Amino acid sequence: MALISGYHHVTMSVDGAQEDFDFFTGTLGMKSIKKTVLFDGTTPVYHLYYANETGDASTIVTTFPFRKPGIFGKRGTNQSKIIQLSVPPKSLDFWEDRLNGAGFKAERTERFGLPRVAFAHPCGIPHELVAAEKDDRRSIVSDGISAENGIKGIYGIGIAVFDRTSMDDFMTIGMGMEKDGEDGSDLKFKLAGAGATTAVEVLHEPDKPQGTWTLAGGTIHHLALDTGDEENQLKLKAHLEGLGFTDVSDQKDRNYFKSCYVRSPSGALFEIAWTVPQGWAVDEPAGQTGRTLVFPPWFEDRKAEMIAGLEEFHW
């Protein structure tokens, strides 16, 4: 079953908007491609998008800064734990030096035979830059970061679990991925044919407390896989429901893409998504996205109220 082609994006809830923006666009050199607001609920919260210059699927990291409403969660097991980004294999020295020089404690580590640099987002969420082979995506180039060193996009997600076996059927029979190795008690899954762009690492952590599942600062909210179009999305939704994964949402309009969500047996929230034809240019000129704060059509009558409730930051 080939209903997904790779990652679409990953999303986390963070603390302050300014430190988040400076971290992704400054320290990591990613591009700001959209500044909007949380589409669900009533609390005014930014939704910030970072990616390569054109906002290609598989390069997108999005964040909800929760400092102003003061909503914070607990990191633990049975939730997504680590954001993993792919970098050129020979760039790890560069990144270790750059991150430590910017005040982020960065250190070398290895899992599943792949060397990586481990560090943390300003709000504490673990991140890794993975020296992924055979990643033909172009690097993101910015001030001080050359094509030889730039981030290429998402490598994967590390998911902490009580029971590692609970993910086997969901990842293989459900999502159509394949098991790609073990490292101690940890498991790795990948999408066949996707090269170095679609890994899910299942990290066995049975002795840690349950992590938060709600939208709350300091936690990863979900990972999104790309179905490419609506037909594949609805086929995969029906397939998951047919397997008995009944906690699958109806399709939700995210303005730039359409989404369905499913809670995996590990507790980690998965999304299946596809980008609409206009993509990021729905509400900003193509090639100039991410420069203004934009709102979905259904929030037009609440713009003034929401702006008043948002944290101030400079971009």
Image: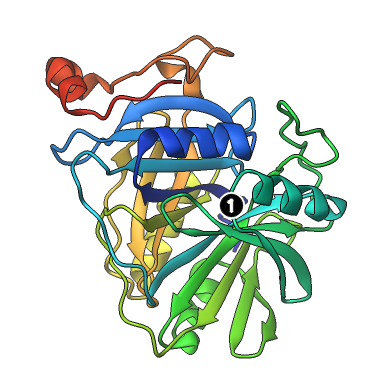
Within the image, what quadrant is residue 1 found in? bottom right
Give residue 191's position: percent from left, percent from top: 65, 63
Q: Is residue 51 visible?
A: no
Task: Rate crowding at label 1 as few (under 14), some (14 to 19) or many (20 or more) other CA atoms within 10 Å.
Answer: some
Give residue 154's position: percent from left, percent from top: 62, 50
Residue at image position (61%, 52%) is: 6
Give residue 182's position: percent from left, percent from top: 68, 85
Residue at image position (47%, 15%) is: 291
> How are the residues colored?
rainbow
Left or right, residue 282 beside residue 143: left
In the depicted structure, whether residue 237 falls above or below residue 140: below
Mark 1: which secondary structure? loop
Residue placed most toward the observer, 100 or 118: 100
Left or right, residue 178 beside residue 144: left
Residue at image position (77%, 36%) is: 138
Q: How many marks?
A: 1
Residue placed most toward the observer, 26 or 209: 26
Residue at image position (50%, 51%) is: 121
Residue placed most toward the observer, 216 or 1: 216
Residue placed most toward the observer, 197 or 229: 197
Extreme-top residue of the structure: 285
**Residue topped by disc 1:** 104
In the depicted structure, whether residue 13 falls above or below residue 148: below
Within the image, what quadrant is residue 137 found in? top right
Within the image, what quadrant is residue 199 found in? bottom right
Q: Is residue 91 visible?
A: yes
Kind of residue sitting beneath label 1: Phe
Give residue 198's position: percent from left, percent from top: 64, 58
In the depicted structure, whether residue 148 falls above or below residue 233: above
